Image (spheres, rainbow, N blue to C red):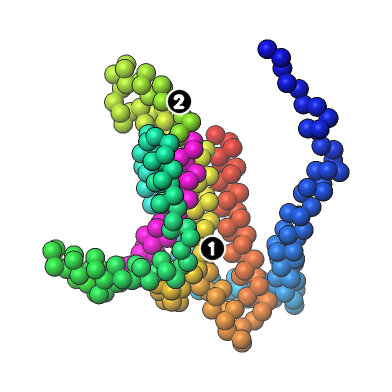
């Protein structure tokens, strides 16, 4: 059998590659580096005034802790549910799997306002699920609805559109996983749970860590759903930033510094996830 070799038409020089990459680089520069430069310049107005003022505020540190707790909790819930769903999808035939992936990805197209309104209708004080639980189990609708409007409730709501991200990341890995390893272990007497814990999960550590870091960064930086659901009652960094931006009397240097801190925090979480994933 003849071996096909790449001819001259398949080779691209450095100039061609640079030309092909230039549109993306221009867009990246205009919509990332340029705005980031303006924000950085505003944050440095007055030297370290913005940083010193922001770090001296007690609500900033409370919001930082709440944001990290929200990100970790939402990511943990999303990863657990997403892994279970991806395991089931990987065992399906291709056509039904693609159909289910399409349905699962639909929440990604919804705005945060729609997601928040849907959860209010379902889990609010007069929501369908709340009233059903009150009728069947005698659950206090006021206490139940307050839990939905707490940081823990936010983590539950965030999982609605974070789970599809986890499923989309893990399903291709599981589809290409060699299940013969699991069959061999079970034939030697290992239980199904044992094969998952000792064979499957160790080989999925890298994509699981990457998926966890991605959805945690999204949860830390998101504000639309939280704003529509709880307003500014929950102290998290994105809602602090929204309040400062919407307030004409805010210190612009402090506001810009908070924006940079939030961006750096999300970038750090994703970077740690990529580093930990590649180290596996």
Label 1 to label 2: alpha-carbon separation? 36 Å
- Seen at 63% across and 75% down, the residue is 255
Q: Judge whether 267 appears above or below 196 on screen.
A: below
Give the magenta-colored segment's residue range.
148-173
Residue 231 left/right relative to 54: left
- Locate the N terminus and report the quarter of the image it occupies: top right
Snapshot quadrant of residue 234: bottom left
Dot 1 or dot 2: first in sequence order is 2
- The mark found on residue 49 in the picture is none
Q: Secondary structure at mark 1?
A: helix
- Give the residue number, with chain letter if any, for mark 2: 178
Q: Residues within 10 Å of mark 2 (few under 14, many from 20)?
A: few
**246 vs 84, nearest the viewer:** 84
Residue 132 seen in the current view: yes
Callout 1: few (<14), some (14-19), or many (20+) C-alpha neighbours within 10 Å? many
Mark sitting on residue 221? 1
Q: Quick check: 15 above or below 174? A: below
Q: Check if residue 164 falls in the magenta segment.
A: yes
* Prevailing secondary structure class for the magenta stretch in the rendered image: helix
Question: How many numbered marks, from 0 up?
Answer: 2
Asked if marks 1 and 2 touch (Cβ < 8 Å), the reply is no
- Foreground pick, 214 / 108: 108
């Amino acid at each position: 059998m003849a071996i096909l070799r790449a001819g001259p038409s398949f080779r691209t020089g450095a100039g061609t590659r640079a030309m092909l990459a230039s549109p993306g680089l221009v867009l990246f520069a205009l919509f990332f580096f340029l705005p980031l430069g303006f924000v950085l310049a505003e944050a440095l107005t007055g030297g370290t005034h913005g940083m010193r003022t922001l770090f001296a505020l007690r609500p900033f540190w409370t919001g930082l802790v709440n944001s990290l707790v929200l990100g970790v909790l939402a990511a943990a819930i999303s990863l657990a549910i997403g892994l279970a769903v991806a395991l089931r999808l990987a065992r399906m035939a291709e056509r039904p799997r693609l159909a289910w992936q399409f349905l699962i990805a639909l929440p990604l197209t919804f705005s945060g306002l729609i997601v928040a309104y849907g959860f209010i209708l379902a889990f609010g004080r007069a929501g369908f699920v709340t009233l059903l639980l009150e009728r069947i189990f005698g659950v206090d609708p006021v206490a139940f609805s307050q839990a939905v409007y707490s940081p823990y409730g936010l983590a539950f709501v965030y999982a609605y559109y974070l789970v599809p991200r986890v499923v989309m990341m893990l399903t291709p890995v599981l589809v290409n996983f060699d299940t013969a390893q699991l069959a061999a272990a079970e034939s030697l007497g290992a239980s199904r749970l044992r094969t998952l814990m000792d064979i499957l999960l160790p080989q999925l550590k890298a994509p699981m860590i990457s998926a966890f870091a991605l959805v945690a960064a999204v949860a830390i930086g998101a504000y639309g759903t939280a704003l529509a659901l709880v307003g500014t009652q929950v102290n998290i960094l994105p809602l602090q930033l929204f309040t400062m931006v919407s307030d004409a009397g805010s210190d612009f240097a402090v506001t810009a510094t908070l924006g940079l801190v939030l961006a750096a925090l999300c970038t750090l979480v994703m970077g740690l996830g990529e580093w930990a994933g590649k180290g596996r």
